[in-house]
Amino acid sequence: MADQPFPAAVAAGAPAPAGPLAGGVPGRPGAAAAGAREAVAFDPLPADLRGRSLLDLGCGTGGRCLEAARRGAQRVVGMDLDPVRLGAARAEAEREGLAVEFRLADGEHAALDGPFDHVLCLGVLEWARDPLALLNRLVDQTAERLVVEVADPAVPKGSERWPSLRRALLARMPVATVGRSGSSHKWQENPRFAFSYAALENLLFFQRGVFARFGRLPAPPGRLRVAAERRRIDDLVVVAGPTGSGKSTLIETIQRGGAPALCARLGLGDGARWPMLCAFDMVEPQEPHLERVLFHYDTLRPFLRSSHVHARERALEVLACARRARVLTVWTPQPVLLARFEQQGKARKGRRRRAIHALFSDRERVLEHYREWFAFCAARGLEVLVVAPLEEMRCLTVEEWEREQARAAAEGRP
């Protein structure tokens, strides 16, 4: 995805008022950079925060937190390691009568007590001991929008001999630089890390499945500021099953109104109002808020990729984006799966296809695969219905499905 500015409707905020906004990390240059930072200091804040919550990690003297409270935020939490700056922030909040909670705490380890609608992490990530762990913590705390600012490795440093080479190599490459974190100056410590735009895009958008879009925000000179907006789904129905089980057919049937009993049992209403998404759609920018989604999911995905288990599967992070999530699992007997796979001419061509063919050739392995999927869903408290077989459109609970399999085994049926 090309380097692009964040959509104006999402990034828009009010102009910054006069006065310095100090950073939140001891050892960083503060006063010298205050003027440059001031022009974009409040850009990460939406103009209207009424009823919303915000976490500012590395809040410093609390300028962004105070402004968020002025814009109507219902809950504002600022965290920093500098007690002097936090003292100034608390004094200003008390003077203005603003309800802001300032905490003296290390955001890498302290309880964050989220989620928060908006999470800010400006000038902190490059100083963290474990920036990837911190970034993942912040992702999990974000309900709507995460803003991160770091040192930009594509910007030439001082009297660098080949500045254009740095820009050419780092501007679009997914690069993270690692510093020594030693003292190169009596009063100034070098940052531990710097991340290129493409590196942050990979970490937040492509490696995690929770964000619907990602882009660049205006930033002070030498800095890189990005925003990621979280996917939010009101009602999610996952239509799952192994390759060739009939997931697409079931979704099409629901969308054209061909499964009234099933739709009534799930309370879906008009199936035509349910758009379909699949794992491949999640790597393209989308509207963050969707009322309803039918999510097409192949339960073989993690076993044919590096994740290996459903719990590590990126696509299934969509479950964390839904207020309500249910699962429809398409049960297809092993002989039917094998016949369909072979009819498609895919058998024994390539390592992954050979693995699928071996699985579909063994009834017990197919049953075990379904049970692993059911166990994953149960561990997350998901409501699961089994559609078995697809042609009959019968809905079973997992317990009813297990009883049917026990009877089939006793009678020698597949």
Image (cartoon, grey):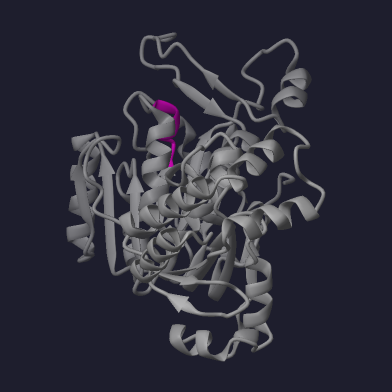
Up the image or down, 178 lies above or below 195; here it is above
Magenta residues (range)? 122-127
Rendering quarter of residue 92: bottom left
Residue at coordinates 44% horizontally, 41% vertically from top-left? 122
Q: Which residue is at the front of the view, 361 or 309?
A: 361
Horizontal side, residue 148 vs residue 403: left or right: right
Q: Nearer the viewer, residue 152 or 297?
A: 297
Residue 315 horizontal/vertical position (percent)? 55, 52
Q: Is residue 93 left or right of residue 11?
A: left
Q: Relative to residue 34, is residue 260 depicted above or below?
A: below
* Residue sitting farthest toward the right: 345
The location of residue 149, given as percent across then percent down, is 50, 40
Residue 358 image point, x, y percent: 62, 39
In the rendered image, the vertical position of residue 51 relative to residue 366, given as above or below:
below
User: Do we see residue 20 in this rendering?
Assistant: no
Q: Is residue 342 covered in magenta?
A: no
Residue at the image position 64 percent from the left and 70 percent from the top: 276
Q: In the displayed structure, does residue 401 sit left or right of residue 348?
A: left
Q: Residue furthest front?
A: 411
The image quarter containing residue 334 is bottom right
